[in-house]
Image (cartoon, helix red, strand yellow):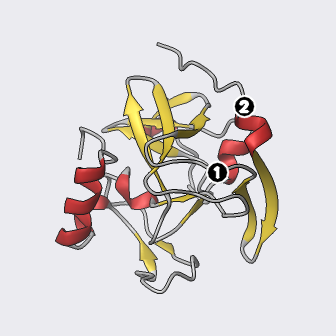
Amino acid sequence: MQCKQLSQSSTNLCIKDTKIGKGVFAKAKYNFGETVLIFNGKILSFEDLPDPYIDDYYIQIGPDKYMGPSGMMDDFVNHSCNPNCGIKIDKRCVRLIAIKQIEPGEEITWDYSTTMYHDDFKMKCLCGSEICRKVICEYKYLPDHLKRKYVALGIVPDYQ
């Protein structure tokens, strides 16, 4: 199954420099539940991931499935411990949806921990949010109140 591409996604988003590298920013308003971006990339198994695994361009989309980098805008969406988007996975369709209203000029972010399942990944968090957890790791290590919030928003994959 392929995702239906968004006709305006490239015009409503742009890549800009951030304090940690590059990020994706809204050029238009996005409402709660609206698809902001569709992720593209080759589907890989855990064994096919690069070793050592040193970049964060891979998204876990199943217990043993990952989506690799696309070379496009989706590679530059950063993590936040207080995100404005979340991932929805439907078979091979990986969509980034707004979990709150997003205004023009805001950086588009999602919580990487929501899709992470294996115990082999930790990353220092540099999001700068007032509620920063300082470490990005697997979903199972998130505080219970945050898990409940993400489940209620519908942004926790079935394999979690």
Residue furthest to the bottom in view is 130
Q: Of residues 103 and 10, which is closer to you in this image?
A: 103
| Secondary structure at numbered mark 1 | loop
For image coordinates 44% across by 45% down, the residue present is: 87
Q: Which residue is mark 2?
A: 8
Q: Is 145 located above or below residue 110 in the figure?
A: below
Three-letter residue code for mark 2: Gln
C-alpha separation, residue under disc 1 versus residue under disc 2: 12 Å
Per the rendering, the mark at residue 145 is none
Q: Is residue 71 visible?
A: no
Mark 1 and mark 2 residues within 8 Å of each other at the beta carbon: no
For image coordinates 20% across by 71% down, the residue present is: 145
Please state the horizontal and vertical placement of residue 27, each as a whole percent of the image.
75, 51
Residue furthest to the top in view is 1
Q: Which residue is mark 1?
A: 29
Label 1 crowding class (10 Å Cα cut-off): few <14, some 14-19, many 20+? some
| Secondary structure at numbered mark 2 | loop
Q: Is 2 located above or below residue 54 in the figure?
A: above
For image coordinates 67% across by 47% down, the residue present is: 75
Label 2 crowding class (10 Å Cα cut-off): few <14, some 14-19, many 20+? few
Which badge, 1 or 2, comes first in the chain's sequence? 2
Please state the horizontal and vertical placement of residue 127, each as a whole percent of the image.
57, 76
Three-letter residue code for mark 1: Lys
Please state the horizontal and vertical placement of residue 118, each as a whole percent of the image.
32, 53
